[in-house]
Amino acid sequence: MQKRKRKGFSLRRREMLSGLLFLSPWLIGITVFFLWNLIQAMRWSFNYVFIEAGVGVQFRWLGLDNFNHIFRVHSTFMQEMFESILQIVISVPLIIFFSLFMAILLNRHFIGRGLVRAIFFLPVIMGSAAIANAIEITMGMLMGGMSHVPPEALREATGFNAAIIISLLNEFQVPPQVIGFLVDTIANLHEVIRSAGVQILIFLAALQSIPPSMYEVAQIEGATGYETFWKITLPMVSPLIVTNIVFTVIDMYANSETVETARITFFELQNFGASAAMSLSSALLVCVALFSICYIVSRHVFYYD
Amino acid sequence: MTPRIISKKTHRSQFAVYDERGRKIKLAKRGKKLSRSVAGTVALFLFIGIFAVFMGMPMVLTISNALKPLDELFYFPPRFFVRNPTFSNFSDLFMSLQQTWVPFARYLLNSFIITGFGTVGHLIFASAAAYPLAKNKFPGSRILMSIVILSLMFSPVVTGIPNFLIITQLRMVDTYWALILPAFSASLGLYLMKQFMEQVPDSLIESARIDGCSEFSIWWNIVMPNVKPAWLTLIILQFQALWATTGGVFLQSEELKPLTFAMNQVALGGIARAGEGAAVMFITMMVPVTFFVISQSRIVETMATSGMKE
């Protein structure tokens, strides 16, 4: 009897191949635009990098000197890095709870829901550098005469222009002391929402993916709102809690002192190698922190199947 | 942590529900109200309302500034609301930018091209890549996910110069591609889509496969509709990010620059351009806001499990 010849690939191989086919466009992109950059940055961190006129980027091998410099010679880098990480670890639970709470509120049916959601997303839109910059220029131009406002209040928060609120309160003739207090409060709130806007959006999407039939069943069986939250809402959004932790950590790290120091080292001090070393080492450290948080949290995640 | 109810034991009118570990689940007593009290609801909405008023203020001010005539813009002390609304700022803006060598509509078109192509391409690339990462566990997928997270973490400061060199070598400087192509393979969307796709029940995909559905068709007809809230969110995030780019060093020709660049130019134009600055700011801000409202209203509850019986 002739042995039957196998046609094509096995199921497993076929699955893998189709997976690779789906992955390939993105894989090419990330190789060109990220992995190559990562390799370059690694190379930079071991070299003294300088730009010579007419020749381009030049390298001189330094070994571990750049790392030695940032960890043992640089006066503030170590401290800043650990403060950034501490700040991230403290803020993550606050932002996650706040955004879950807001998402549940905004997911309820009420009139003007779309508009209210847009308003909550507004800080994210206006926080982007180009738009915040234009607002600052315009407001500075229009409010040139407001000398009774302390300059610290105007400089207060990133992406938020206190002059806007001050002009409104001025309209209603509120005394300056009250204005000062309100501006501080709102600037802080604005900062919280700015850093939670994306997370609220992700939780909203997660809440909308919960099949309504589950809530119907719970209601028929007589579960209270409290029980429904703990037994249905929280387990069903729990996979996205991990996602949101990742987003929060990345966002906070991108806006942290450490990255700012790396930027200054790069553009102002033109010490490219040291800047690459700073970015690499701090990114790796934050990654380790992130993976350990995710590992702990993901053990409590519930996957519906 | 499971919403499934395993068994019910009925004893006279008494009613007890047990979960899968056999623990008793407490039920509400009869007559007890199931929903929150009216006062609680009112308080919650008051809370949202106050928040919304403060957060919405910049938008209201932008609108009212755009409608203010020039004399009202410079009124001292400044006024928040407009008294005599006029569209003269917009007509001034179009008039003065019509006469420059790049008309205003061109900036707007550039922004739409970059944002539109970048967003759609990113959505397709990211969700196609997310499907095998979420559902076919093959060797190397964990390493790939670690690379994704690392790339999210890696600050654009250091990658800036190598990235520029790559774009130069690909001869894409001063074309739209310099901004669009890197956006295609951004890893933010991939991560988001992968997390959502993991929640699509495996049995749904298996049954499609048994019925002879091709992998492409499973992705496009089964998985994608089920993660609609996810990709609408992804579109919003990517749209917002691309809309805010000024082109930077990648676009040097004036006729390729996006709207945000024009906005900064007008805003820097000084006192005489203040009205136009307010108008262009209104346009720049309103496009993402409108987009957001439209795409949010498209989200309806999906029914991932509605076709399943257990």
Image (cartoon, rainbow, N blue to C red):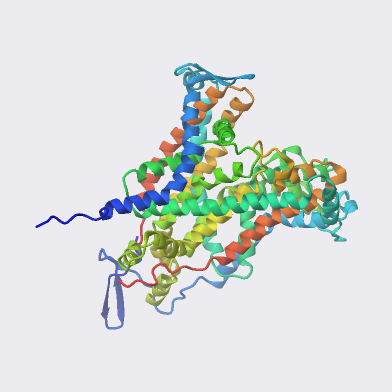
Which x, y percent locates residue A43? 47, 25
Residue at 36% across, 57% down: A302
Q: Position of residue A9 (x, y in %)?
A: 27, 53
x then y, percent, for residue B260: 71, 46
Residue B46 appears in the figure: no
Residue, far left:
A1
The total number of labels drawn is: 0
The reply to whether residue B259 is in sight is yes
Indicate the quadrant containing the N terminus of chain A: top left, top right, bottom left or bottom right.
Answer: bottom left
Q: Nearer the viewer, residue A182 or B246?
A: B246
- Furthest toward the right, the residue is B71
**Residue A81 as seen in the image, left or right of residue A124:** left
Residue located farthest toward the front when viewing the structure as drawn: A2
Viewer-closest of B160 and B275: B160
A221, above or below B261, in the image: below
**Quarter placement of the C terminus of chain A:** bottom left
> In terms of depth relative to the viewer, which is nearer, A153 or B124?
B124
Q: Nearer the viewer, residue A173 or B187?
A: B187
The image position of residue B11, as x and y in percent, is 26, 80
Residue found at x 63% / y 62%: B293
Placement of B15 over or under B191, stated as above or below: below
Q: Is residue A123 left or right of residue B181?
A: right
Q: Is residue B183 left or right of residue B264?
A: left
